[in-house]
Image (cartoon, rainbow, N blue to C red):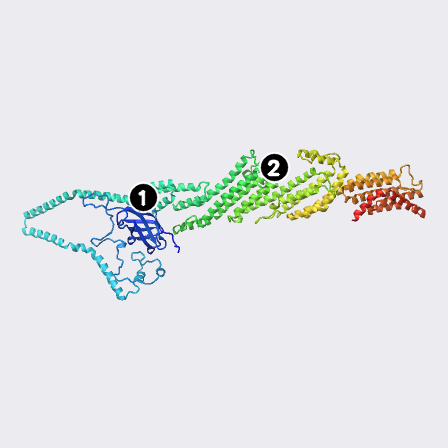
Amino acid sequence: MSRSRQPPLVTGISPNEGISWTKVTIRGENLGAGPTDLIGLTICGHNCLLTAEWMSASKIVCRVGQAKNDKGDIIVTTKSGGRGTSTVSFKLLKPEKIGILDQSAVWVDEMNYYDTRTDRNKGIPPLSLRPANPLGIEIDKGRFPQKDLEALFPGMSADFTSENFSAAWYLIENHSTTSFDQLKMAVMNLKKQANKKNEGSLAYVKGGLSTFFEAQDALSAIHQKLEADGTEKVEGSMTQKLENVLNRASNTADTLFQEVLGRKDKADSTRNALNVLQRFKFLFNLPLNIERNIQKGDYDVVINDYEKAKSLFGKTEVQVFKKYYAEVETRIEALRELLLNKLLETPSTLHDQKRYIRYLSDLHASGDPAWQCIGAQHKWILQLMHNCKESYIKDQKAWRCKAPQQVAFVEKLTKLVVIQLPNFWKLWISYVNGSLFSETAEKSGQMERSKKNARQRQNDFKKMIQEVMQSLAKLIRGALLPFSLREGELRQYGGWEMKSELSGQWLTHVIQTVRLSYESLTALEIPNDMLHIIQDLILDLRVRCVMVTLQHTAEDVKKLAEKEDWVIDNEGLTSLPSQFEQCIVRSLQSLKSVLDCKPGEASVFQQHKTQEDVCQLSIGIMQVFIDCLEQLSTKPDGDADTTHLSVDISSPDLFGSIHEDSSLSSEQRLLIVLSNCCYLERHTFINIAEHFEKHSFQGVEKITQISMESLKELDQRLFEIYIELKADPIVGSLEPGIYAGYFDWKDCLIPTGVRNYLKEALVNIIAVHAEVFTISKELVPRVLSKIVESVAEELSRLMQCVSSFSKNGALQARLEICALRDAVAIYLTPESNSSFKQALEALPQLLSGADKKLLEELLNKFKSSMHLQLTCFQASSAMMKT
């Protein structure tokens, strides 16, 4: 069965040596909850419970009995704690027999005692020697439970020696079944005892009545004799004799006891002086003890001694005591200053801070040491933060680490705050709830005062936390976001040499660092309104990270032109569109953790200005890539761009790319870029828009729309350039070919077939087809349709310019127009059909069947002779159908 209290522990006994029946004071811990809880007390093996007087849980007074051992422990046993232990011992001295005239340095303690030889009371007898049965009748213990009696008489006791003695409790416990007659007899016994005490003062007088009577008779006889003689002679003679007798008696007594009485007087004075010194040696030795304990750091001992001295001598009127107590106060005041200086020293642990605050509180120091400590810690944290900045700025030029200096600074600064602020916050919490002081009854007043002061200073502490948070945020802004500070703040929190702005990767690292610091601070249960400034800082860093990342992405996209190797796949595409998409995806993936909102964070895109800026940067990235395509498409033949050689001269693909470049014509580059443009429009830009939406970008439709329009404009410009390059030579060769050899539509022979100029035109169209087909099959219909439109338009114009046709001329013209139209029939458009129709309408109609038959034979002959060349158009037709 476990006990509810700890075992008793004796830590001191005063005095620690003496003879039997020496009165001692025992001090310690858990010495019982009350007089009834004390069930055992032994000193040097002798049971001293009968003389024990329980004073408190830390103090017992008793007398040492006749022990067998010379030295032994002091063992206290209680109901609640059981048998205890002792850290001190008592030494029992053997009394020496001293004669009446022998000198001695030991004397009997001048106190009230009970003389067992004469059975007389000398003052008040010790508690242990008082009668155990004051009523003088038989004790009959009742069966009432002790707990019920304690509940019935709270704060009282059945012990008749206690100050809280309850007669009712005593009678219920010891005489619950005693008869009324017996109780009346007990009353008579008490009255007899009281009368004996009153008669005790007369006992001495009664015992010496005979002596008094004899002295009175002698004096009366002398007086009567003097009256009977009636003479002066007799009177003078008797008086002289009496005086002589008295003088001789006095001289004899002085002679006999002069030396003894002198020694007694000297012993009395010495004893009185030693008694004073012994009794008040605590006060006389206290200044020196205070100094020694302060040097050893035993402040608890000093405080306990001071409290004891203050209670004993604080209001004394004795000059000697006043002098020594004033010296004690001087030492204590010096101790207060020492403890306050230690409290305000930095750095210091939270444990030491609480300890010094308690010491100062116990010493009743003026002011509010706890609040002074909070203020000192606040200033110290701010100073540490600024010193951290200054140290990094000082080392800017000598910085050689891999991580940028600003990043290292933010890591060090946030680590500093996360380490120091928790102790600062916990100190405040202890100040608020009063836990800086022990929760005993005597400290409850200090706790209440502390709580009251904390309530009054709540706003002041809130300003301290906000100042620390503002300094943290502004120091980070000075290093990473200097443009967000005012000019005055920049001088205080800035000072960094901005050689180049941090990359998005390092900014992401910084954001992660600040976020971890924020989480550590919120774990302290600091109110969110005090940390709002850190949330704003994180938001601004996230926005800046997005902006910088997009700007760097635009630079990376611009460099893609240098990586173009002009190697095409089966669909006529180079790796450039894929590289562009991958560049965008990598950029967005690097922003994922930045764009994701942690608990309590707002979206990066919550502000309209941010949305617009991000949208413009995204459009800028797309436009940069479109400009790259235009730059590549207009690159002159053989003009290798060597500006990138300085970037990566060791690249193994560098000269291979130049070789590839030199083998491509400008028309082929145009076709490749056109093929890439088509793929970008149908796939890449749509995929990128999906990635933007996936990462919560705003204005994706606007980004896609503007980018598509710009891409289509480039595509149209490049397409028109290519058509101009290919169609103009073919169109330009028609008119000279038609009128070669002074051909005249009015005077020509019967047609025998299609003339060479038309065949040459078709061969040139086939060459364009082959070139486009080699690059991109999908571009073939678009390119050839436009070339056919140009050729048909030119042919229509030439036919309309002829003033008149002969029969043979009209047949020849119709043959060539129909041959060209039928050869490129797969690429005819409404525009080219209209041109061919206009050309035929400009010719005279064929009226005879022979002419129609001849036209059909000549067309069949042309198709048969050009079958091999025209096969490419049929393959294109099959491909277009599929």
Q: Is the residue 24 above or below the residue 635 in the image?
A: below
Rendering coords of residue 431 (x, y %): 45, 48
Q: What secondary structure is found at the residue carrying circle 2?
A: loop
Residue 283, numbered label = 1
Residue at point 38%, 52% (across, down): 6
Q: Which residue is mark 2?
A: 500
Judge the density around disc 1: few (<14), some (14-19), many (≥20) Cα neighbours within 10 Å. Answer: many
Task: Check disc 1 and give the amino acid type.
Answer: Leu
- Measuring from the top left, give residue 128's x and y in whole percent: 27, 54
Q: Residue at x 20, y 45 (%)?
A: 98
Query: In this orientation, which residue lies closer to the viewer: 563 or 443?
Result: 563
Q: Residues within 10 Å of mark 2 (few under 14, many from 20)?
A: few
Q: Position of residue 202 (x, y in %)?
A: 19, 56
Q: Looking at this rendering, what residue extends furthest in the bottom direction?
A: 180
| Location of residue 628 by image quarter | top right
Amino acid on which disc 2 is placed: Ser
